[in-house]
Amino acid sequence: MTALCVPSAGLADGVVSVFYYPWFSGLGSGDNHWVQGGYHLPDIDSNYYPSLGPYSTGSLDVLDTQMAEIASAGVDEVAVSWWGRGSTEDQRLPAIMASAEAHHLAVAVELEPYGGRTVAGTAADIEYLTTLGVTTFYVYEPFETAPPAAWTTTIFALRTQGLTLFAQTGLVGQAATADFSGVYTYDIVTYGARELARYCKEAHQVGLLCAPSVGPGFDAERATGDPRVLPRRDGATYDGMWRAALKAGADRVTITSFNEWQEGTQIEPADPPQRLQGMPYASYDGAWGLDGKAASTAYLARTAYWAAKFHAEAKSASP
């Protein structure tokens, strides 16, 4: 089936987007997402420890701090993880959008594989989210929900409304069949730096936007026991992925992630807590030759470096 051709409306070249998780609640709460591996606060289920401690993304002060940090890193868009209407993520979205706007950040939504997700239900949820002002969507694993052809009419209709929709998939041809605006990878372990040139080439050959995901590393052992590790290599992993994304001709860059602490992909500031020195938390010490407080914000600073480079290249390439 040949994909329908609808131009992507309102998409600026050179957008840097970061995936953001609003599911954290702080000390004293029940399902707070910090202790999924059976840990007990203040010990948490991550190999790293946030500088803010086990925070709540329901706190306006936390949101203000985080959005300021994201803006300082040269990021244009916050892609908020969303798990269906009525979920914690849904309830917190308006406050996130307000805080993001105060820091001149756009907000997109990453539609997760929430229970009972269907093509028709996804379309209805997108229509609902547009009433909040969201116009860009990242659909995680769409073809686990339904095959590409089942999405085509729905995605076409949404795109004619001026919406931009990215499919998370390594199979670019499927996204083209489903008539998505573009593709993104999210998974920085499977789709590392060496995969990005091929990925974007395939996307451009079929008229799709390429939004490859870059990230600093991956280590989910404390949270899930996942044996896969993508070491940070003192920042070299992050640099390598950014360099590959720019060389691949990415239309936008997506960052995995700002605060997915359980998978160890976060660029949010981290410090081993003094009161828990006996716990096996890693730090960012050594990243780009930095230590201590300077290292704790090293990934934000490096993101600003790469975002500026990407923005400059995109501007020089625009007609």
Image (spheres, rainbow, N blue to C red):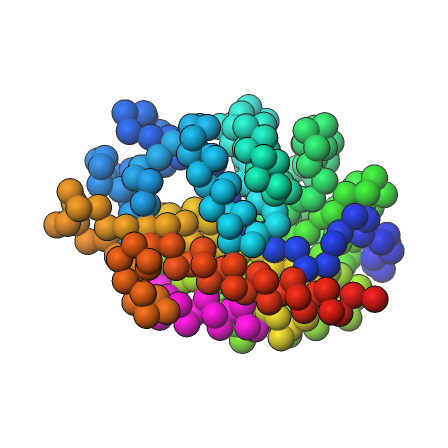
Up-down relation of residue 111 to residue 58 (above or below): below
Where's residue 260, x and y in %? 42, 47
Q: Residue furthest left?
A: 278
What residue lies at 21% left-to-right and 46% top-to-bottom?
A: 273
Q: Left or right? Give the position of 286 relative to 206.
A: left
Q: Quadrant of residue 36?
A: top left
Residue that appears at 25% across and 39% down: 38
Residue 96 seen anywhere in this rendered image of the structure: yes
- Position of residue 286 measured from the top left corner of the image (x, y, whole percent): 30, 67
Q: How many marks?
A: 0
Instruction: Tell whether position 237 is magenta.
Output: yes
Quarter of the rendering occupied by the C terminus: bottom right
293 w.r.t. 103: above or below: below
Q: Which residues are magenta?
A: 228-244
Q: Quadrant of the N terminus?
A: bottom right
The x, y position of residue 19, in whole percent, is 53, 48
- Whether residue 276 is situated above or below residue 98 in the rendered picture: below
The foreground one among 99 and 87 is 99
Q: Is residue 183 magenta?
A: no
Residue 92 vertical placement versus 263 (above, below):
above
- Indicate the position of residue 59 as horizontal and vertical percent values: 42, 28
Q: In terms of image quadrants, where is residue 282? A: bottom left
